Image (cartoon, rainbow, N blue to C red):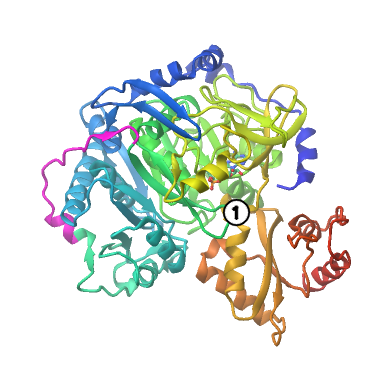
Amino acid sequence: MTPNDLDALLRETRTFAPSEEFRRQANYNDESIYEEAAHNPEGYWAKQAENITWFHEFESVCRWDPPHAQWFIGGKLNAAYNCVDRHTLTHRKNKAAIIWEGEPGDSRVLTYDMLRREVDKAAHMLTELGVKKGDRVTIYLPMVPELPVAMLACAKIGAMHSVVFGGFSAQSLKDRILDAGSKLLITADGGWRRGKVIPLKQNADEAVEGTPIEKVVVVKRIGEAAQAGMNPTRDVWWHELMENAPTKPFPAEPVDAEDYLFLLYTSGTTGKPKGIVHSTGGYLVGVNTSMRTVFDLKDDDVFFCTADIGWITGHTYIVYGPLSAGATVVMYEGSPDYPDRDRYWAIVEKYGATILYTAPTSIRMFMKWGPQYVEKHDLSTLRLLGSVGEPINPEAWMWYHKYVGQERCPIVDTWWQTETGCAMIAPLPGIVTTKPGSATKAVPGISVDIFDDDGNPVPPGHGGNLVITKPWPSMLRTVWGDDERFRKTYFGKFEGIYLPGDGAYRDQDGYYWIVGRLDDVINVSGHRIGTAEVESSLVAHPAVAEAAVIGRAHEVKGQAITAFVILKEGHTGSDDLVAELKQFVVEQIGAMARPEEIIFTADLPKTRSGKIMRRLLRDIAEGRVVGDTTTLADPAVVEQLKSQYKDQE
Ligand code: WT7
C-alpha cells in the first residue's frame, strides 16, 4: 500500500455492526471482555490457558525481563497431545480433523483418531531415525496431509520443526538447513501446481549438499512423473518407513512451557532471513484463544484457511489453532484457478465450510476474474470471513462482503506477523463494528499503541509506528542463533516495547488502519521479501555491479518488486538480460521474489553518505511527483532515472 492510499482510507466512513443473529450466537458478545483483559492481562491469559491440557500446572503466568518473556512458567505440556490425543478421549474421536483435497481432485479425511495413529507412527519413525528432543527437523513438503503429520510428530517428540515453503529454491532451502543445523529433511518426490510438477526432490538433492543432513525422508506424491532419483544411502521413502513403524501409541514427551516448538524463517531488512523461534506453552495458548475469540469457533464449524502451511498463517490457522481447538480444517493442495477459477468456491460448497480465511491479494484476483465464479456455487454454509497478510483495500473488503459473504458474514481483518504467532489486531466478530480497510482494535489481552519516532504515543487522528507495549503469550522468543538481532530488530528503537515495523494510523474512534511496512521489507501477495535479499541475489550475477530494489504499488499483488540495476563495464542491458536476471533471482530465492520489472540505469539516487534513497525510486516507479531531493549527492540522477523508467517500462 502506498501513502496515497491512506487518504482513501481516511475517507472511508461505512460501518458494519454485527447482525443481531450473529451477535446472539457468538462466543463473545459482551464488550466487558476488553476491559477485563486490559485490567488484568495475566489473569485473562491464565484463564485462557485452562483450555490447554497441562501435564503439570504452571506456577506463574509471566516473567518479563525485556526483551525476554517467559509464560506459564513451570508448566509442562505437549503440543501434539493437545492437538490430537486429547480429542480422541472425547466425542471428537471420530470427528474429521483434517479434510484434505489434492489439486488433481483426490481427497482424504483424517479423523482425530486416524490422525493420532498417523502422528504416532511418524513419531516412532522419526525416533528410529535418531530424532530427539531439541533437534531441528527441516520439512520441505507440498500441502499434503503428511505435512501436518510430520510437524505434529516432531512436536510429540519435543523436536523443533522448521518448515520451508515449497516455493523456495534449493539455495534458500540450503541456507535454512544450515542455519537450523538440521540432520533430517522431510520432502516429497514433487508437488502439484496447476497440473505441473514442482521438482521438490531435485531442489532438495541440490540443497542438502554440504549440509549436516544425514537422511532424507521422501513422501511419494507424484510417482512415475516425478523423475526423482533416490540416493540409496541417504534417501528413504516415507510410506515404507510408516508401513514398518510400530503401531503402538507414542507417549507424548512432556516439554516445558518455554521449550521451543518450532522455527520459521521470515525476511528482514538484511539479506539473511531470520529464524523466528516460538515456544510451546505461550504459542499454544495464544493460537487456541484466537480460535474462540477472533474466529468465534464452534464444534460444528468447518474451517477453511487457504494459506500454505509453509507460512505462519498455515502453522497457526491450519495446524495448531484449529487442531488444538478440536475443529475440522479444510486443507487444499493447489492453485485457486485449477482446473477453473471457481476452485475455492467448489471446495467451500463440497465440504460445507463455515469459516473462510484468505488474503487480500486473492480477493483482488477474484474481483478481476468476476463474481460469476463465486455465484456458481452454494456458499450458504459460510458464516464468517477472515483476511490476512496485508492491508485490505476497502474496495476488496466490499467485494468480499458482497459476493462471498453475501452481506451476511462478518469480516475479521486480522493484523499479525510471523513473530506475533497469532492475530493481534482484529475485531471480535460478535462485538466490534467493522470498517472496511481497518483491522479495528487489539484483541483482548494485547496492548498496542502508535508511537512517534521519539517514543511518544500519538493522539487519535495521527499516524506513526505501530507498537506492542506489553508481552503476550505467543510472542517470538528469539531469533535462532542470534539473540542480538532479536533485541536490535524488535526492541532496539523503544526500550521494552515491541516494534513490528509497520506504520499505522488511529482514527477518532480508536480504530487502527495499518498502512504497510516502514522498513525495507516488501509485501508481495502477502509474502514478506527483504529488499536486501533480492539485491544481494542480483549482485551475485556476473553482469551486475549494483542493484536497488523497491516495492511499488500493484493492483493485485499489493506490491510488486522493481529492481534498478547498474551493469558492470562491458555489459549492456537487453530484454534477454532482463529475463536472465529474473530467472537468476527465482533460482536463488524462489518464484515469489521474481522482480516484476528490471530497469537498467547508470546511476542510483544516493544521499551524500551513500545510502540509496528508495523513497525516490518508489516515487519514480509509481509515477508520482518525486519528493524532496535536496539530500541527494547528485539531484540530476532522478531526472535521468525518470526518463529511463519511461523508456524501459
Ligand atoms: C506483515 C507480516 C500474519 C500472517 C501473514 C503475514 C502485514 C499482515 C495484515 C493485515 C495489514 C498486514 C504487515 C505485517 N500484514 N496482516 N491484516 N493488515 N497488514 O505474515 O509474513 O510475518 O508478514 O504482513 O506488514 O508486518 P508475515
- Indicate the position of residue 467 as horizontal and vertical percent values: 62, 33
Give the answer, above or below, for where 280 lies relative to 74: below
Ligand 1 falls in quadrant: top right
Q: Nearer the viewer, residue 55 or 169?
A: 55
Q: Give left or right: position of 572 versus 247.
A: right
Callout count: 1
Q: Nearer the viewer, residue 319 or 60?
A: 60
**Residue 305 visible to the viewer:** yes
Decide: few, some or many residues near mark 1? Use Cα within 10 Å; few <14, some 14-19, many ≥20: some
User: Which picture quadrant has residue 45?
Assistant: top left
Give the answer, above or below, for where 519 lies relative to 251: below
User: Does the stretch in magenta take in 130?
Assistant: no
- Indicate the position of residue 31 as horizontal and vertical percent values: 56, 14
Q: Give left or right: position of 328 versus 490.
A: left
Give the answer, above or below, for where 268 lies relative to 432: below
Residue at screen point 86% across, 66% down: 634
Give the answer, above or below, for where 126 lies relative to 402: below
Q: Which residues are magenta?
A: 240-258
For numbered disc 1, what is the local secondary structure? loop
Residue at screen point 25% across, 46% down: 153
Residue type at the position of mark 1: Thr
Q: Please identify the quadrant where the C terminus is shown.
A: bottom right
Magenta span: chief secondary structure: loop
- Indicate the position of residue 338 as horizontal and vertical percent values: 49, 58
**Residue 309 visible to the viewer:** no
Q: Nearer the viewer, residue 288 or 23?
A: 288
Toward the bottom, the furthest residue is 570
Residue at screen point 28% across, 63% down: 220
> Label 1, on which residue?
269
- Indicate the position of residue 294 as horizontal and vertical percent values: 50, 28
Residue at screen point 49% across, 33% down: 382
